[in-house]
Image (cartoon, rainbow, N blue to C red):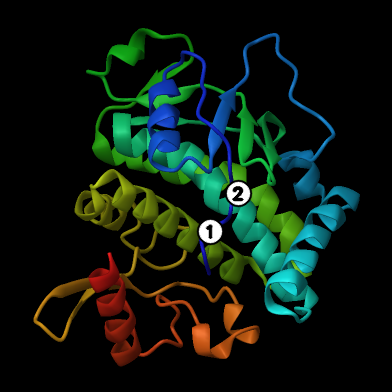
């Protein structure tokens, strides 16, 4: 599945994670994270929706998914099954939402917490308005002296904070989207696993730090880290000229093949290695 289409300029207030979000928007201008001050109200109406309302699985989720259904019809000239639409909708929320946590961890070793009530999303504008509920950091981080800091002893403890922060935010969303997607817990958490990995992997590529991200993600998701399913799934293929082509095997299927079987994702379990090599080699040449 493609990266969600988002658009907006960068801006962020001063905080422990402000520099991370500014850097994120610098390399990916399609996403702007707005940090709300203590007295600021979250934006409402005009296309904004809170993660909490999506998690409820009611009218706000209906409206959210109606947009996805219309977009599929516009882009591909056909209607997608309701469960496929729900999967697309979850992806378009979860991809940027997981970056709220993984990017500060990757760039500055800080892991914010975001209850679903503290995140609002404007899909058309590519904006997320957020209020962190504290953050974790390492003992030698200057931010350890800031209000809301929670110091953890080492890198593995910080990775545990990443896993816990994503799970706390995404768990309610999976409960809300799950019945629409016709998937149960394990299958839903495999989707969350993929969003964590593919979101940060893509941003790290834009940052010119792809290899480090792959190593970090393998440590973050080594397997047996419930509720997540499987590992980061990275492996390497060899191109026709002997070049190394990094790829991964998704833990879940985004169902894009139901619309365009010939254009299944390059990391899809349905895509054979020969096809991956051909497509990755062509992309490397074009790039």
**Residue placed at 46% from the left, 88% from the top?**
270
Image quadrant in which you'd find residue 207: top left
Q: Which residue is mark 2?
A: 170
Question: Vertical placement of 121 versus 68: above or below?
Answer: above
| Residue 124 location (% of width, % of height) | 69, 46
In the image shown, does 65 or 187 lie closer to the viewer? 65
Q: Is residue 181 visible?
A: no
Q: Residue at x 42, y 17 (%)?
A: 149
Task: Pinpoint residue 246: horizontal percent, then vertical percent.
Answer: 24, 70
Picture quadrant of residue 121: top right
User: Can I make out residue 20 in this image?
Assistant: yes
- Packing grade of label 1 (10 A; few <14, some 14-19, many >=20) is many
Decide which of 141, 206 is in the foreground and name it.
206
Identify the secondary structure beneath mark 1: helix
Residue 271 horizontal/vertical position (percent): 41, 87
Dot 2 lies on which element?
helix
Q: Which residue is mark 1?
A: 192
227 horizontally vs 144: left or right: right
> On screen, 287 above or below 81?
above
Tell me which residue sits at (71%, 13%) in the image. Answer: 40
Dot 2 or dot 1, earlier in sequence: 2
Badges 2 and 1: C-beta atoms under 8 Å apart?
A: yes
Q: Marks 2/1: CA distance?
A: 7 Å
């Amino acid at each position: 599945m493609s990266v969600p289409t988002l658009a907006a300029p960068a801006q962020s207030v001063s905080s422990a994670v402000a520099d991370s979000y500014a850097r994120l928007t610098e390399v990916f201008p399609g996403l702007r994270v707005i940090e709300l001050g203590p007295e600021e109200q979250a934006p409402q109406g005009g296309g904004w929706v809170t993660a909490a309302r999506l998690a409820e699985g009611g009218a706000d989720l209906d409206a959210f998914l109606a947009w996805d259904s219309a977009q599929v019809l516009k882009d591909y000239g056909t209607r997608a099954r309701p469960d496929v639409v729900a999967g697309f909708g979850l992806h378009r929320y979860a991809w940027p939402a997981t970056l709220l946590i993984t990017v500060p961890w990757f760039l500055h070793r800080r892991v914010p917490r975001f209850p679903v009530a503290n995140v609002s999303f404007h899909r058309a504008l590519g904006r997320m308005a957020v209020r962190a509920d504290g953050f974790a950091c390492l003992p030698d981080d200057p931010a350890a002296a800031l209000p809301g800091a929670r110091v953890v002893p080492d890198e593995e403890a910080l990775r545990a904070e990443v896993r816990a922060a994503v799970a706390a935010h995404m768990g309610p969303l999976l409960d809300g989207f799950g019945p629409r997607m016709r998937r149960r817990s394990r299958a839903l958490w495999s989707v969350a696993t993929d969003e964590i990995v593919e979101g940060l992997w893509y941003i790290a590529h834009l940052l010119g730090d792809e290899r480090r991200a792959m190593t970090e993600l393998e440590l973050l998701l080594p397997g047996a880290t419930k509720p997540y399913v499987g590992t980061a799934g990275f492996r390497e293929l060899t191109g026709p000229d002997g070049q190394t082509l990094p790829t991964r095997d998704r833990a879940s299927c985004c169902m894009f093949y139901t619309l365009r079987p010939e254009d299944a994702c390059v990391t899809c379990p349905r895509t054979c290695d020969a096809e991956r090599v051909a497509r990755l080699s062509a992309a490397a040449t074009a790039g």
